[in-house]
Amino acid sequence: DSGVTQTPKHLITATGQRVTLRCSPRSGDLSVYWYQQSLDQGLQFLIQYYNGEERAKGNILERFSAQQFPDLHSELNLSSLELGDSALYFCASSVAGVNNEQFFGPGTRLTVL
Amino acid sequence: SQQGEEDPQALSIQEGENATMNCSYKTSINNLQWYRQNSGRGLVHLILIRSNEREKHSGRLRVTLDTSKKSSSLLITASRAADTASYFCATDDAGGSYIPTFGRGTSLIVHP
């Protein structure tokens, strides 16, 4: 158990819908990362937050957004969902912002029908 | 494109044998990390090696780093069926964002 929790575990929804994925980092970790893992694209970095502020952006679509709240939990919002958004979405946390070991949550499996 | 790429894509061995996986990357790095992922689960950190280190050990794991060749290898000695998983290297970009970039992984199957 990494100490990172993600909810829900599974999500099945239809194209055009909007969903919110939630992540609670390990106690004491200030940095949260979001990743998307699909068979064809591998593990893609989406976005990082550090202590409530956006720190880095990766291959995140404009339809996706995220935020980190004062209690350090984070949410990833996915809107206007498309079939291609079906993937595993992982949250990871680390103590600081750079060059640190990341602790991954169990992931949320999103299926868009 | 991926910063780090693992090789081989898949590896199948018998229990007790050693497994070697390689990672090549393109730009200068601050450090390189190896992670393991069991099917459909989250990644688990195995080992971090800094750019000024050449070799690191952790239990049955041995990682080497050759910055002149921009490559790293992960050796698992005396493999067990429980080592069956995908293994990823993650590299940052010393001249860039410092965000770890993951390769596509090596899928290791250890037959009992």
Image: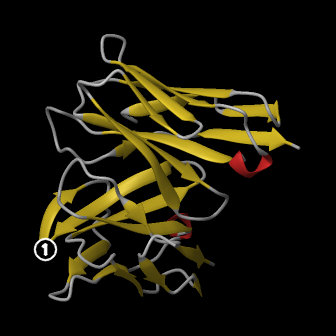
Q: Where is residue A26 in the image (x, y as percent from the top left)?
A: 33, 75
Q: Position of residue A39 (x, y in %)?
A: 60, 52
Residue A94, by quadrant, is bottom left
Q: Position of residue A61 (x, y in %)?
A: 32, 63
What element does badge 1 sit on?
loop
Q: In this view, does A6 lie above or below B67?
A: below
Q: Nearer the viewer, residue A59 or B64?
A: B64
Q: Nearer the viewer, residue A81 or B7?
A: B7
Residue A14, by quadrant, is bottom right
For badge 1, the amino acid type reads Asn
In the drawing, does residue B64 fall left or right of residue A69? right
For disc 1, the chain is A
Q: Nearer the viewer, residue B21 or B27?
A: B21
Q: Which of A18 and A109 is in front in this view?
A: A109
**Which residue is denoted by mark 1 in the rendering?**
A51
Check the picture and name the quadrant holding the C terminus of chain A.
bottom right
Q: Is residue A18 above or below residue A112?
A: below
Q: Residue at x 33, y 76 (%)?
A: A25
Q: Where is residue B4 in the image (x, y as percent from the top left)?
A: 41, 32
Q: Residue at x 79, y 47 (%)?
A: B81
In the drawing, does residue B25 fall left or right of residue A31? right
Outermost residue toward the right in this view: B112
In the drawing, does residue B44 fall left or right of residue B60? left
Q: Which residue is drawn at 40% across and 36% down?
A: B2
Within-10-Å neighbours for mark 1: few <14, some 14–19, many 20+: some
